[in-house]
Amino acid sequence: MQGSLFRFYVHEGHRHQGRLVWEWLLEQGNRLGIRGGSAFKAMAGFGRHHALHEARFFELAGSLTVEVEFIATEVEARQLLDLLHREKVRLFYAYMPARFGVINPDSADPPAAGEDP
């Protein structure tokens, strides 16, 4: 199938509607029917302020980034973006074309809408 890799970068303590944003994003992606999503905690990194944050410093606990990613069809990606705009959630993201599927699918896998084998 053709679609997109959506990657969001959020601070681990960032909240929306009282929920951690990374948890909220995964819940919303699931609710929208996106086939899968994952969250990964960074070991180290920097952002627009160029301050390096590393997991080994106790005083920086809670300041690392969580990467939340989804592989989504174009329709699913549009629905997710529309939701984020409506909810006024401020997030940095990367959005890349992706080709995805399941090797040796079984009957529980959704059909691969017109993709080449």
Image (tube, rainbow, N blue to C red):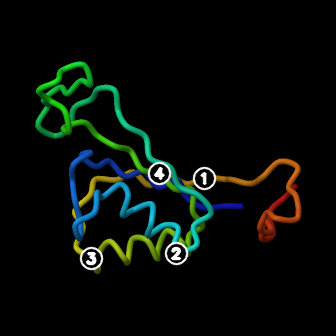
What separation in Å lies between label 3 and label 1 (alpha carbons)? 26 Å
Q: Which residue is mark 3?
A: 87
Q: Earlier in the sequence, mark 4 or mark 1?
A: 4
Identify the residue under disc 4. 69
Q: CA distance from mark 4 to mark 3?
A: 19 Å
- Horizontal and vertical percent position of residue 8: 37, 52
Amino acid at dot 1:
Ala
Q: Name the residue: 59% across, 58% down.
A: 36
Disc on the earlier residue, 2 or 4: 2
Q: Relative to residue 36, is residue 106 drawn left or right? A: right
Mark 1 vs mark 2: in front:
2
Nearer the viewer's eye, disc 4 or disc 1?
A: 4
Q: Is residue 40 left or right of residue 114?
A: left
Quadrant, the N terminus: bottom right
**Residue corresponding to mark 2:** 32
The CA distance from mark 2 to mark 4 is: 14 Å
Q: Is residue 41 left or right of residue 49?
A: right
The earlier-in-sequence mark between 1 and 2 is: 2
